[in-house]
Amino acid sequence: MHIRRTLFLAISEFCAAKAHPTVSASQPHVARQYNAADSYAHWPSYAELPPDARYPTRAAWGVWGNDDVDGALNHINESSILAARSEIQLGRTFNLNLPLEEPSIPINPNRKPLQHLFQPSTGYTDDVVVMNTQISTQFDGLRHFPYSTNNSVDTYQWYNDLIPDYEDVIGPAPSTVLGVQQAADKAIVGRGVLLDFAGWALAQNLTYDALHTNYSISITQLDAVAAWQNMPTEWSRPGDILFVRTGWLEQYQALDAYEQNILPYSKEGPSGGLLAADETLEWLWEKKLSLVAADNPAFESTPFTQVISGVPRSLHQVFIGGWGMSIMEFVDLEQLTVALHDVGRWAFFVTICPMNIVSGIASPPNAIALI
């Protein structure tokens, strides 16, 4: 039995290596020439990704250096933060986080709902909260989604190839690299930009079902949204945080309690979001965003069945595993959207502070917008 299992594992590893070559110690990263004084010198275009053909699809490994752990958050710096201050004009604040118990049944029913208990004692009372960090509004850390060619742990690859084995993520003594505590240490502050696709669609009399279909939002449509919002052609700045209001949350909150409760158990479970395609990735890469966010379950449409650069891939794989770019999902944009439209604006100041969980996978974002 042991001999047969050893032979089987050896054959499996060989086949995986042929299908998905990895970078090893004998194959060092090919990094761009990084200059702190000019962080965008030698900046690769999307067509030039990955820097080395051995890396996964459109990976940006080495773009910020071989040992980099911050990924797209490197776009945020002191200058971008100071420039973002100008978006605070009215002194109004907006909570972008849903209650932790919403949705009451997680959209992925494999994830358990929030458990909120009270622990009384003499003269005081404590809370006890047990939760999956992938329910309610969530911030996906860089350990959440690796590249994989066949959904097998044998082919998992994380950002910058910094995690050698899945055991380093889920084992009894996990490593700390790429843990969500890195985003907490970064203390994310910058300029948020809202693209109100749902509002634009309503103005165009475009009807779509974001809850039960994989309606896919194209880059052409997002450009049209920007024009509808009277945004300049070159509206992005390095370090911006892009928020897309897909309309998913608005449609979900319009359901009655019964419809909300049965939604996670629909047979296919698709949902609307951005189209996972090369044109989407190129559009986003050239804008030098620090992270992306939306009001839907996955930012992109689901299920993850698209092909990117000729390989079955999701935006999750390229963003998190390839670019080191986190994703925020189920972001509550409803009140902020109304306020921005009322004053004719589309940009705002935003702070995001994930929980400081060493080796963490994800976290509530604790996101606040200011206008």
Image (cartoon, rainbow, N blue to C red):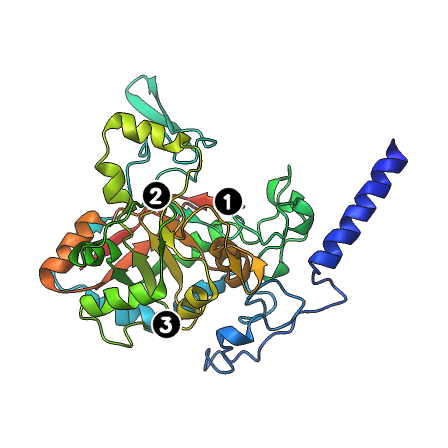
3 vs 1, front mark: 3
Q: Which of pointers 3 and 1 lies earlier in the amino acid sequence?
A: 3
- Which of the marked residues, 2 or 3, is nearer the chain's N terminus? 2
In primary-sequence order, the first of circles 1 and 2 is 2
Q: Give the residue number, with chain letter if any, for mark 2.
A: 137
> Local crowd at mark 3 within 10 Å, few (<14), some, or many (≥20)?
some
User: As rendered, which of 232 and 335 lies closer to the eye?
Assistant: 232
Q: Could you give the CA–CA distance between mark 2 and mark 3, rounded to whole angstroms?
A: 25 Å
- Viewer-proximal residue among 327 and 361: 327
Category of crowding for the residue at label 1, using alpha-carbon neighbours closer than 10 angstroms: few (below 14), some (14–19), many (at least 20): many
Q: Secondary structure at mark 1?
A: loop
> How many discs appear?
3
* Amino acid on which the number 2 mark rests in the picture: Thr
Q: Residue at x 40, y 50 (%)?
A: 301
Mark 3–mark 1 Cα distance, whole angstroms, equals 27 Å
Q: On the image, numbered disc 3 is attached to which residue?
A: 238
Which quadrant holds the N terminus?
top right
Instruction: Give the secondary structure at mark 2.
Output: loop
Rendering quarter of residue 254: top left
* Three-letter residue code for mark 1: Gly
Which residue is under mark 1?
Answer: 360
Q: Which mark, residue 250? A: none
